[in-house]
Amino acid sequence: MPAHTKLWYFEQFRMLSALSDAQRRHLEKVTRMLEVKRGTPIYLPGDPSDLVYLLKSGVIKISTTTPDRREVILAFLYPGDIFGELAVVDEAPRDHVAEAYEDCVICAMNRESVMRLIRETPDVGFQITKLIGLRLRTLRSRVEELLCKSAHARVAHALLELADRHGVSDTDGVLISLRLSQRDLGRLVGLSRETVNAILQEWREQQLLEMDRRSVRLRDPERLRQIASHPAPGEPPAARHADRTERPKTGT
Amino acid sequence: MPAHTKLWYFEQFRMLSALSDAQRRHLEKVTRMLEVKRGTPIYLPGDPSDLVYLLKSGVIKISTTTPDRREVILAFLYPGDIFGELAVVDEAPRDHVAEAYEDCVICAMNRESVMRLIRETPDVGFQITKLIGLRLRTLRSRVEELLCKSAHARVAHALLELADRHGVSDTDGVLISLRLSQRDLGRLVGLSRETVNAILQEWREQQLLEMDRRSVRLRDPERLRQIASHPAPGEPPAARHADRTERPKTGT
DNA sequence: TCGGATCTGTGAACTAGCTCACTCTTCCCC
DNA sequence: GGGGAAGAGTGAGCTAGTTCACAGATCCGA
């Protein structure tokens, strides 16, 4: 829903558009395309961070496994998204899992080539910074959400975000074609499978959505949006802030 | 505790060290230094993102206020830290609050100057990317933590992180000199003030820490570390992953 | 130096979400 | 096409953490 989402999606291409033909040909050469079957991990924690990936088709799941072997899903990625981009930042090994959640076609560029590209065409570096920055922003709002929204709000939000990035609207709402199990939806928002089930059941009864094992259809995104913004019952209003005019002046 | 923390701290300076003397002088000129009293906001959501800040002394609180006027603390920043860095990424207005949590001295550089600097000295841009990337990584582990750690673990973790970034060790543990209220500690980890109080009380009895209104002393960081890594009672072990050898080969 | 505001400390009651335990369905691989 | 595994659906407790409602301590500004 946020305006920047769509924008973000196109950033990757703007990134590539800054390239000269020669660079493009070079990139072509150092890039490896690969097909990955649903369920296959692309990298695991501890793996060297030597490649940056571009997702051409399919869905990628980014997740971590906590010490107690519980899985937390950090994000789903869609065609056009880049992942493993922190390889550019430093050489620290991967600290999360990237796995094909549907059959995927991905492009892998090795670290050195990307670095070289950045050096030659600073704008590419800038685009990558932008990408990482936008992810940072998204993640911040996620933290905010986790810290203070109810189960219902979190599920609603997650579904809306999926719809926004991956859904197709028609006269009857938005269709998200993704084989997303209730357990995974739970792992995405930090809820147990049972709770997710109950919530979805409730919404199904209220005609807010339909879902089967291979897709979800949001019949009333508007209503869901309302639910998503509904906070968990919370701390009483207590905002007090110095008046806006009191902010420090950037004097000389 | 993670090795990269200290490193990160120095990144800012490496960033500046890439500058020529001329650039340094220029930076000097376009930079405004300002003193900000405890409690004063530096920017608020909706403000234009036209400045990037470097914290020279004091503590900055980064937070957001949710629709229901509940406050979530995203981070505390210490001397050497940069904030407002997303101004570099795009022109979207601020989406969070930055406020002086202790009296601060900060440097403000305007967006254009920073951009120019990046254009002239790509390495600066790279350092900024690195900074944002590291923040992204930190935030990811935070999401993981919020999604699956117990109250005790979260508080312990938060305290250890504060100690790591801002504490001073001596023979009797680590001293964190920060006027941190229990309510704010709660807002940092997503717990009610009362819960935080109970936990701290418990630890006080076990001699794990001391705290008064102006500082916290961790007497047994080791034990706290253990608590921090203790997961919330959770989903049963269910990890199964294709063998590592099954990862897609980056063939030609 | 006084008075209001903010912070700490603590109990009682409530509740959202979790675990556990089970059934039924659907998928998909051999 | 048959069997085993993964998913969906549901109910009965349980419990961690919440809200609410106090009381006392301390800070800070006028």
Image (cartoon, coloured by chain):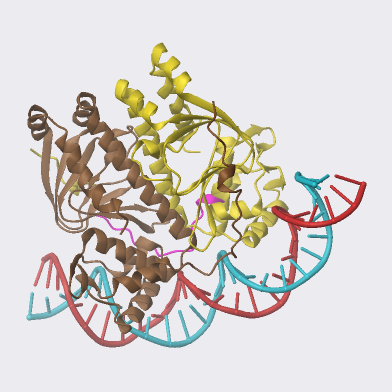
Chain colours: A yellow, B brown, C cyan, D red
**Residue extending furthest toward the top:** A21
Magenta stretch prevailing secondary structure: loop
Camera sees residue A151: yes
Q: Which quarter of the figure is the N terminus of chain B placed in?
A: bottom left
Residue B166: image x %, image y %? 21, 60
B194 shown above or below B74: below
A150 shown above or below A104: below
Residue B239: image x %, image y %? 59, 57
Asked whether, in this view, residue B171 is left or right of residue D22, the answer is: left
Q: Which residues are magenta?
A: A226-242
| Residue under the point 22% across and 33% down | B124
Residue B217: image x %, image y %? 23, 73
Q: Nearer the viewer, residue A67 or A168?
A: A67
A162 shown above or below B102: above
Asked whether, in this view, residue A74 is left or right of residue C26, the answer is: left
Judge whether residue B197 is colored magenta.
no
| Residue under the point 33% across and 76% down | B200
Residue A135: image x %, image y %? 41, 40
